[in-house]
Amino acid sequence: MKLIVISLISGILFGIGLALSQMTNPDKVLNFLDVAGNWDPSLIFVMIGALIVTSLFFRKILKRQTPLFDKAFYLSSKSAIDKPLLIGAAIFGIGWGISGYCPGPSVAGLGLGNFEAIIMIFSIYMGMIAHRLYK
Amino acid sequence: MENFTPYSAFAGGILIGLAATLLLLFNGRIAGISGIMGGLIKAPRTELFWRCAFLAGIVIGAFLFHLIKPDFYQPREHFPIWLLACGGFLVGFGTRMGNGCTSGHAVCGIARGSNRSIVATITFMVSGFLTVYIIRHVLGVAA
């Protein structure tokens, strides 16, 4: 139960952050990615703001034996920079550049009454399921 | 640069960073949205609830913010649905293949010093830049 409450609070903060930063505006995202055009660099500040906080705390937190409410940290154990990582990230970048949505803002869009969010979430799951089958 | 909004972007980023910190400190989980979404496809029951709570939280947070500050969101009109669906499909496929998206790799992975996340972030950023460049400046669609 404790885990669920924290997840909900964390999600709410995350959702407010996405809406406040306007990561939820696909046109703004595409203008951020349009370096050669009428570039809007605003969204780089989202990453800077987030990374300042996470960089400050993550290493300290991960020095603990366990998190506060669970028995262990759940982290990826992979360390090799392999083909699936590179190709997968490149494919994601293409989808992001076409649609203007990464996964977080697609979910947040549901809270904004954004019709596009429904299409994004549906097609993201289609892509995820296709990847399961492909693997 | 007429729509440059560095302060609200920065403040939003701080909130996202705090959200990720909370989830790691208390629950030991990485706030990677694609990973959390993907885990819903096939996860044991105990794994389902926190994921749903987190995703529901995102929807609630965005909804609450929108109630207070409706002008931060401008709906996009006339974007072709088939193109959106193609983009979404690639986002889903690519984030599963590459084990993460903007949140998992760029916000969380880099902070814990993961080389994979640094490389993934550079890769999807460059890929996104190139994609928009090709669409807008080579094919000349929209601007």
Image: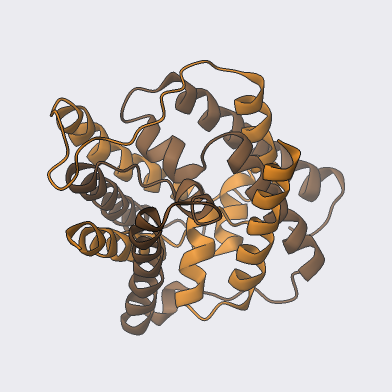
Chain colours: A orange, B brown
Q: Position of residue B31 (x, y in %)?
A: 36, 47
Q: Using residue A5 as the reference point, say whether residue A33 is left or right of it.
A: right
Extreme residue in the bottom direction:
B67
Q: Position of residue B127 (x, y in %)?
A: 67, 35
Quarter of the rendering occupied by the C terminus of chain B: bottom right
Extreme residue in the right direction:
B139
Q: Nearer the viewer, residue A49 or B50?
A: B50
Q: Is residue A24 above or below residue A42?
A: below
Task: Please tell me in which quadrant of the rendered image residue B51 appears.
Answer: bottom left
How many labels sit on residues?
0
Q: Nearer the viewer, residue B49 or B91?
A: B49
Q: Nearer the viewer, residue B17 or A124?
A: A124
User: Residue placed at 71% from the left, 48% from the top?
Assistant: B90
Q: Using residue B5 as the reference point, say whether residue A126 is left or right of it.
A: right
User: Residue placed at 31% from the left, 55% from the top?
Assistant: B7
Residue B63 visible? The answer is: yes
Q: Position of residue B28 (x, y in %)?
A: 25, 41
User: Residue placed at 43% from the left, 52% from the top?
Assistant: B44
Q: Using residue B143 as the reference point, say whether residue B67 is left or right of it.
A: left
User: Residue placed at 73% from the left, 48% from the top?
Assistant: A130
Residue A36 visible? The answer is: no
Q: Position of residue A126 (x, y in %)?
A: 70, 57
Q: Is residue B86 above or below residue A63?
A: below
